[in-house]
Structures are given as C-alpha cells and as structure tokens.
Image: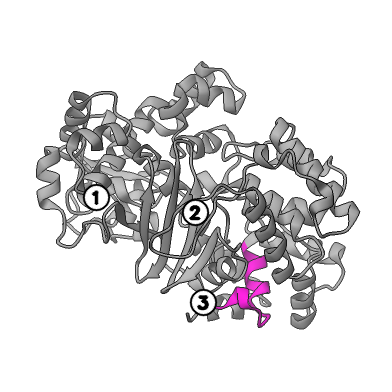
C-alpha cells in the first residue's frame, strides 16, 4: 500500500486508524515517522514519504513519534492473511527466530537461501531480516523500560541486544531519548501490577467482539493449563528459554496483558503468541465488509461486528487437542486433554491462580502408552501417529510453516480427516480461509439460516466468503447458544 501515495495521503489526512500497521508516514522536515492515525496536524504532502515497515523508516534515519508511538501499532494483517515467503518470514521474526538462531536459522526454517530471504524482504519491506529484528528488539526494550523496574543492563540483554552500548545507541536512535528518559516519561501507573509481572496493553483494530473469542478459550480450557479467573483468560506458556503465565482481559481499545516469565528473553515471543492467540492483527473492516455482502451473513455481522478467530499459542498443542476432540463433546475433549496434561505435563507454580502445568510437547508424549487412553482404539492410533509425526518432524506446524504442505502432511496420517485438517489450519496455522463444511455446528447453523445443507453445496456457497471463510465460521457458530459464544461472567 505504501506505493499508492494518494491513498496513503487520504488515510493520514483523515487520521484513519484502520491503516495503522499497513504503512508508516515519515516527515522529511522533522525526521520523524508516525502511524496514519497520529493525532498531530498532518504535515504538508510534499514533506511526506511512506514506508512499508517501521524498520524501513528507522533504517532511513527516521525516529519514532513520541505522540502516536508507531513502533507499537498493530501488526500488518498481511502477515496472517498471506502464506508466501515474506509473510512466513515476518511471523518467524515476530516469534524471535532471528534473535535465537540468526538469519541462517530463519532461512533454514523457510527452506530458502539466506540471500533469497534477504532479497525478498528488502524488495517488499525496505528492510532485511536483521533490521526487522532490530526494530522488534527496540520495541521489546521500550516495553521493559516502561513496564518494569529492571536495571537497564537486564533490559538490554532481555530484549536481545548483544551489548549495553548497542542497546543505548538503538534506543536513542529510534526514540530520540535515552533509556532513563523513556522510563521517566512512562505513564503513571504503567508499572507491573505485582512483583515479577509485566503489565502491557495489546492494541488491535476496532471493532473487536470478545464474546466468541474469550468464550471459546474459556469453554475449552484444559484444566491445569488454562482457566478463566477474575475476568481474565489465563494460561501457561512453554517458551524457548523457559515458561510463563499470561492473563488476558478485554478492555475498550486494547487487551490488558499481564505476563510473568521465568526468562525475560522470551518477552517478544510471548507477546507474539498472545497476539496470534487472540487474532489481534486481523483487519475487521475488510473481513466484515466482504462477509456483510452476503444477505444471509449481513444480519450476523451487523449484530456483533469484529469477530476474531480464537487461535493458539502452540500449533503442536492444538493439533493434539484437535485429535482428542474428534467426535466427542467439548467437555469430553477437555477431560481427555486434562488427563494427558496431568500425566505428562511439567509442573509449575502459579501464586496468582490455579494453573499447575505446561501442556506437554510432542517429545514428552512420544512414549505415551496408548492403553492408558480412555478412548476408542482407532483414535488412540490416530493420536499416537500424530504425536510420532510431530516429534519426528514429519509434520511441521510452526509459525513459518507452508500451510498447504502442512495440510498435506496432516492428511497423510491415518485417522486425520478433512475436519481435523481444517480445524488445525484455522486455529493452529492461522489460515483465514480455512473451512469446515462437515462440522456439525456449522451445518446446524447453515440449515437454520437457509444455507445449503450438504457439505458440497455449502462449499460452493462459501466461495463468496473467500478469503475470510474462517471468520464466516465464527459468525455461523455464534447462532448457537453454546458456551463458546458467550463471554464468561465469572
């Protein structure tokens, strides 16, 4: 979008927040870059330059505006919508791969050479993987500076900087303030709510309907791993350097996020996982605009606009849970998952609530005794087959995964049918066009609304909803009076 000067100019002059994260406005006279919705008086058009990423603006010598904080705007919805190399790379960079494994590690996960990855990112975003990761480190540092009392040396290394000198130089260059000045300028009350806890605000594009989003997560919560407590969805997180506990609460204009981490180097990755879980980088205007053109869906969209797709913090975890949930009720699926966690999940302490364990990774489940599972023999075989494929790398479901390749890998496993594949694609892989025409709840909603009753006919009708069929599923499911569709009342 940044190449369409007139369209960007209109967005800036109207202060349209829908375009925050799509592009960034750099002002040549002040050497500052802003988000489109910046509240200050727009500069003269001849002084504006538009960039596709904050990293590109920083690399060109611009510093972040202190009013609109463009480095903290919602991420571009393109990285969730698209499935190409650049989108996959951006999802991996957000997850911290460059900081942990370097650019060669990023390229290896994508299946391309380092040179190809760098060339494509530069061509589309105006910045290579190192510059993009640097911009993310700067934002992570700002969060730690403003929301914790950590010494600056600890902030520097937790944010991923190799030295305190590089940390200081980057913060001054990006924000035009020293780290200590940033901390002094932080809003009153921005500190952590409890010792060792970080209090953050996760932005999103309006509108957002929290009902099905938090309702689904709470209704399907695995005992010990997830819970709804005091108006917040809480869960444990298995992370690259340690583990964490997060509490997420819907608020007007943002999601309140309370994070407790055993290793602060996991902060950027934990935030990225929380954003994916709640689908916070979605573009509801685009989704609802298209779905609202269907006369059947229009009343549902008008009644509760901004529905998101409840996703996951760990794709392998969700794949296991999807198989456990085959042909059983929500309550039964929770019971099966809870038993698995109690037997194989790592124990943790949760002073603020009732969480007790991490969901076990595939490697920890590889020695699972199928006879210990209270489910039909065929589903036991399906579960152990999936676990073996995940542990052995035959099925790969990470954030940078090629979605169609993952679908093919899953479909090749015995007992993993189209319903399971599409559920995993929708919630674990983040495919906005995933569709489950054989789902019982979907077919019941379709019949109630006068949509085609058979899966084949429903697929044909759904062509008009593309590429947002996963969101159409959320609107259709919401016609049923099921706990997944209601925000818990505590």
The relative height of residue 227 versus residue 34 in the rendered view (above or below) is below
Query: For mark 2, what is the residue?
Result: 236
Main SS of the magenta part reads helix
Q: Is residue 374 above or below residue 95?
A: below
Q: Coloured how?
A: one colour
| x, y percent for residue 368 | 75, 44
Residue 483 among magenta residues: yes
Q: Is residue 103 left or right of residue 371?
A: left
Identify the residue position indicated by label 3 in the image. Answer: 487
Residue highlighted by disc 1 = 69
Seen at 76% across and 75% down, the residue is 446
Residue 339: x %, y % from top left = 69, 58
Task: Name which of mark 1 and mark 2 comes first in the sequence.
Answer: 1
The residue closer to the viewer here, 16 or 441, is 441
- Marks 2 and 3 sit apart, C-alpha to C-alpha, by 20 Å
Q: Nearer the viewer, mark 1 or mark 2?
A: 2
Disc 1 vs disc 3: which is toward the camera? 3
In depth, the one of 398 and 13 nearer the eye is 398
């Amino acid at each position: 979008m940044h190449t369409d000067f007139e369209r960007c100019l209109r967005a800036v002059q109207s202060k349209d927040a829908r375009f925050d994260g799509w592009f960034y406005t750099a002002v040549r006279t002040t050497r500052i870059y802003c988000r489109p919705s910046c509240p200050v008086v727009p500069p003269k058009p001849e002084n504006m330059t538009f960039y596709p990423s904050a990293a590109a603006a920083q690399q060109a010598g611009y510093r972040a505006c202190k009013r609109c904080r463009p480095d903290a705007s919602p991420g571009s919805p393109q990285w969730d919508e698209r499935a190409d190399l650049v989108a996959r790379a951006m999802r991996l960079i957000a997850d911290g791969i460059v900081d942990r494994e370097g650019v060669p590690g990023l390229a290896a996960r994508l299946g391309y050479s380092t040179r190809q990855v760098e060339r494509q990112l530069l061509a589309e975003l105006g910045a290579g993987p190192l510059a993009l990761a640097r911009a993310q480190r700067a934002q992570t540092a700002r969060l730690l500076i403003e929301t914790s009392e950590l010494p600056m040396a600890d902030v520097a290394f937790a944010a991923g900087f190799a030295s305190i000198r590089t940390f200081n130089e980057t913060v001054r260059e990006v924000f035009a303030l020293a780290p200590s000045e940033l901390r002094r300028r932080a809003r009153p009350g921005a500190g952590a709510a409890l010792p060792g806890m970080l209090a953050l605000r996760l932005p999103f594009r309006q509108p957002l309907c929290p009902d099905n989003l938090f309702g689904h997560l709470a209704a399907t919560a695995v005992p010990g791993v997830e819970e709804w407590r005091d108006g917040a969805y809480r869960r444990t997180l298995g992370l690259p350097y340690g583990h964490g506990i997060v509490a997420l609460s819907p608020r007007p204009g943002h999601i309140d996020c309370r994070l407790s981490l055993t290793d602060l180097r996991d902060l950027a990755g934990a935030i990225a996982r929380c954003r994916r879980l709640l689908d916070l980088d979605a573009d509801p205007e685009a989704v609802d605009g298209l779905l609202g053109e269907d006369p059947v869906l229009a009343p549902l969209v008008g009644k509760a606009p901004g529905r998101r797709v409840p996703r996951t913090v760990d794709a392998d975890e969700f794949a296991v849970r999807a198989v456990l949930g085959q042909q059983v009720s929500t309550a039964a699926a929770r019971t099966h998952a809870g038993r698995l966690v109690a037997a194989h999940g790592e124990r943790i302490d949760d002073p603020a609530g009732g969480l007790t364990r991490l969901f076990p990774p595939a490697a920890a489940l590889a020695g699972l005794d199928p006879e210990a599972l209270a489910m039909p023999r065929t589903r036991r075989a399906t579960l152990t087959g999936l676990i073996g494929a995940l542990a052995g790398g035959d099925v790969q479901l990470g954030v940078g995964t090629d979605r169609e390749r993952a679908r093919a890998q899953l479909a090749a496993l015995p007992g993993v049918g189209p319903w399971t594949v599409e559920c995993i694609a929708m919630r674990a892989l983040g495919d906005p066009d995933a569709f489950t025409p054989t789902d019982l709840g979907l077919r019941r909603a379709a019949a109630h609304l006068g949509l085609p009753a058979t899966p084949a006919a429903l697929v044909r009708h759904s062509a008009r909803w593309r590429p947002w069929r996963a969101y159409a599923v959320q609107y259709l499911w919401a016609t049923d009076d099921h706990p997944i569709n209601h925000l818990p009342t505590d």
